[in-house]
């Protein structure tokens, strides 16, 4: 019953101005930096023993983690949870994109949407790679840290929405009904039979409920003997 905290990066200038950033190396704006510090305070107050921290390699995610978890040096970058490749749509205003014929497909039938350009990705491919990555990391962390492990992944809005839709058993065509705000925390617990969405788009709640149960003293001694315990690597 491993638990993952899905953290969206803090706000950027492109978020604030309605630009589709895609893979552009945009940084957090002043609000976003404040959001990252605030979510770090929530995580610190919860005292969660994070077994691993995984991140999209884009600067806005790495900056969010640097501010939120400054003591975690060994963040693992994973291209599989990077933002969707929006192709020729990258860098364009959303109000302009809303006039494109493809926009209606993205909103109502995203499983059929393929973004234009040589590097354009389909939303179905984006969803598949992100879900496989998170489920893969979850299984790996459970194997190395035990079934009660808690870990964190920092990614992007569409990526997290796709992962949530999968966890809820929803078709990708319904994922636009899910909201994931900048610097929000979404919590999913995976079990052998099903997954549970425990928090969604949480921007201020107490996270201490996700502390794993304390191990018996004899089990803790056994972990110490083999070099076990929490850390930032798997």
Image (cartoon, rainbow, N blue to C red):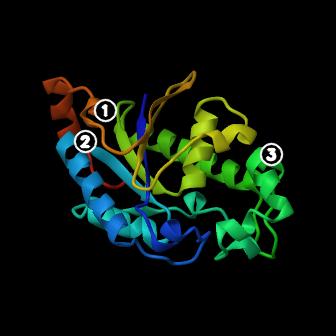
Q: Viewed as shown, does residue 220 lie left or right of 159?
A: left
Residue 66 on image: x %, y %: 30, 67
Q: Of circles 2 and 3, which is in front? A: 3
- Regarding residue 83, the answer to whether it shows in the image is yes
Dot 3 falls on a residue whose secondary structure is loop
- For residue 217, above or below residue 164: above
Q: Residues within 10 Å of mark 1 (few under 14, many from 20)?
A: many
Q: Identify the mark nearer the N-term, 3 or 1.
A: 3
Is residue 74 visible to the viewer in this orientation of the structure? no
Percent x, y of residue 21: 58, 71
Whole-number angstrom distance, CA of label 3 to CA of label 1:
34 Å
92 left or right of 113? left
Q: Residue at x 23, y 37 (%)?
A: 223
Instruction: Please tell me the numbered disc located at residue 48.
Output: 2
Residue 77 on image: x %, y %: 47, 64
Q: What is the quadrant of the N terminus in the image?
A: top left
Cα separation, mark 2 vs mark 3, equals 38 Å
Judging by the rendered image, the residue that carries numbered circle 3 is 109
Q: Which residue is mark 1?
A: 210
| Residue 117 as seen in the image, left or right of residue 165 | right
């Amino acid at each position: 019953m491993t638990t993952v905290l899905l953290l969206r990066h803090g706000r950027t200038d492109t978020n604030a101005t309605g630009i589709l950033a895609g893979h552009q190396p945009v940084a957090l704006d002043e609000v976003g930096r404040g959001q990252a510090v605030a979510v770090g305070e929530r995580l610190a107050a919860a005292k969660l023993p994070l077994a691993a921290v995984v991140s999209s390699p884009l600067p806005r995610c790495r900056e969010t983690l640097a501010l939120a978890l400054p003591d975690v040096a060994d963040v693992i970058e994973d291209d599989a949870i990077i933002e969707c490749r929006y192709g020729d749509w990258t860098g364009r205003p959303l109000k302009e994109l809303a006039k494109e014929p493809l926009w209606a497909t993205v909103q109502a039938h995203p499983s059929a949407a393929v973004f234009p350009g040589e590097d354009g990705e389909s939303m179905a491919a984006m969803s598949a790679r992100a879900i496989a990555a998170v489920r893969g990391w979850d299984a790996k962390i459970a194997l190395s840290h035990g079934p009660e492990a808690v870990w964190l992944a920092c990614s992007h809005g569409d990526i997290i929405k796709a992962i949530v839709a999968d966890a809820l058993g929803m078709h990708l065509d319904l994922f636009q009904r899910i909201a994931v705000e900048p610097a929000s925390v979404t919590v999913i617990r995976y079990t052998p039979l099903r997954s549970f969405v425990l928090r969604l788009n949480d921007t201020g709640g107490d996270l201490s409920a996700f502390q794993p149960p304390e191990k018996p003293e004899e089990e803790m001694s056994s972990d110490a003997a083999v070099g076990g315990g929490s850390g930032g690597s798997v």
